[in-house]
Amino acid sequence: MSKCQPFLNWAGGKRWLAAKKLSFFPSSYATYYEPFLGSGAIFFTLLPTNAVLSDTNLELILTYRAIKSDWRAVLSHLQEHEKRHCKDYYYGIRRQIPEDNYRKAARFIYLNRTCWNGLFRVNKKGQFNVPIGTKTKVLRSEDDFELIAARLRHCRLLYSDFEDVIELAGRDDLVYVDPPYTISHSDNGFIKYNEKLFDWEDQVRLRDALMRARSRGAKVVVSNAYHQSIKQLYDGLFTLVELSRFSRISGKNSGRKAGQEYLILGV
């Protein structure tokens, strides 16, 4: 089965994990659940036959749905962004909110690929407010939206809280979660941003939901921050593995360095 690259940049994305650490994931399972979808690096690498993918970022889910429904329409609008991209155009598109779902999806991808470091951030009014970055290319040589649409064909795409999605998982299903790192490893520049989205109570609620899923016979894999509080939250309940990865979140070269994360296993 042909693999396809994630089409989005995502702070905290798991391309590094997908590239080198798939041996930690079970080789067989029924339905795959990923309730913090983001760029979907693990999904696009595992390519499960059946999947339930979700996120609380509505624009993100609408983008996946639009590609699944009519990837050609999304690509057409994205090609227009490619032709017109410049600083003034970027900020003009950033201010607009299209009504058409395919235009919304193309706008989301365009801003993601041309903003600073692929960061998704909104202000208190819910408006995307990341400044323009240094990338000038909108379309990529590896883009294959037709293949992405095919991979999404048998997936349910939900705009939902993580707990509701995890509750759907049962015997022999696989649940992979990569939540915002509320309690962070050192040198994470987005601690405050993440805490607004996902607080410590959510970390506890996530742990409890995963324990219930495992009690129903589901297999569980969790990416989380390398921090004592996370270790205490899961220690004795799941297996914790320390993994090294390279951070690309910082805007300065000095901040782009090796770090550690926990991979938490209940398989």
Image (spheres, rainbow, N blue to C red):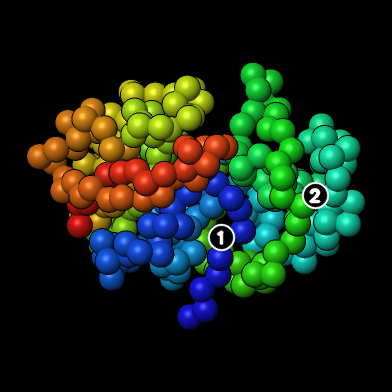
Report the amino acid beneath label 1.
Answer: Pro
Instruction: Assign a secondary structure to mark 2.
Output: helix
Which of discs 2 and 1 lies nearer the camera? The answer is 1
Label 2 Cα neighbours within 10 Å, binned few <14 / some 14-19 / many ≥20: many
Residue situated in front as seen by the camera: 119 or 249:
249
Q: Quadrant of the C terminus?
A: bottom left
Report the amino acid beneath label 2.
Answer: Arg
Label 1 Cα neighbours within 10 Å, binned few <14 / some 14-19 / many ≥20: many
Q: Mark 1 highlights which residue?
A: 6
Give the answer, above or below, for where 262 lies relative to 151.
above
Mark positioned earlier in the residue sequence (2 or 1): 1
Instruction: Assign a secondary structure to mark 1.
Output: loop
Mark identifier at residue 199: none
Give the answer, above or below, for where 180 lies relative to 10.
above
Q: Position of residue 148 (x, y in %)?
A: 60, 67
Residue situated in front as seen by the camera: 4 or 250:
250
Instruction: Report the side of 152 relative to 89 (left or right).
Output: left
Residue situated in front as seen by the camera: 259 or 114:
259
Q: Residue furthest left?
A: 236
Q: Residue at x 35, y 32 (%)?
A: 186
Q: Position of residue 219 (x, y in %)?
A: 25, 56
Q: Mark 2 highlights which residue?
A: 103
Q: Position of residue 254 (x, y in %)?
A: 48, 38
